[in-house]
Image (cartoon, grey):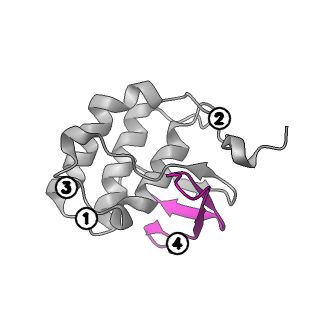
Amino acid sequence: MIDGFNRALAFRLIGPTSKVVELLEPLTYSSPGVGGYYVVPAGFCCDLASIPQAIAALAPDWRSTARAGVLHDLCYRSNAGIARRTADALIHEALLLDEVDALRARAVWVAVRLFGARSYRVKPIAWRPRALRHD
């Protein structure tokens, strides 16, 4: 098994001005350091890697953080069963494996440690934006 992600991210934007995306194919991640094998299912909806304004200047380009952001969003969901500290370690590791430079990966890790608590376990894995709900 290869460490890191299994493929490029395949997604579609939800709505013309939305930052929410829906995965078109499953994305898997094998963690060499933190440990574990993670599967983000097709149909999973999230906002990729949202970066607080406080560190926006240090943040890497969204294309280089997208896969790690999807993995982190999955881990932060209410029914994922993953500790916040583990989720935050995974985003840092995944960014480094996706060749984001160490300073920028560290800035993202610091941001999720400082500001991520309010988003942890707020939504279930099956969360869908209102535009996609059939209720």
Q: Which residue is mark 1?
A: 100
What residue do we see at 39% from left, 49% from top?
A: 90
Name the outermost residue toward the right: 135
Secondary structure mainly formed by the magenta segment: loop
* Residue 5 left/right relative to 63: right
Q: Which residue is mark 4?
A: 6
Residue 42 position, x and y percent, is 68, 60
Dot 4 or dot 1, earlier in sequence: 4
Query: What kind of residue is marked 3?
Result: Arg
Dot 1 or dot 2, earlier in sequence: 1
Is residue 5 shown in magenta?
A: yes
Residue 112 position, x and y percent, is 32, 38
Query: What kind of residue is marked 1?
Result: Val
Residue count near mark 1 (Cα–Cα under 10 Å), binned few <14, some 14–19, many ≥20: some
Q: Which residue is mark 2?
A: 124
Q: Which residues are magenta?
A: 2-31
- Image quadrant containing the C terminus: top right
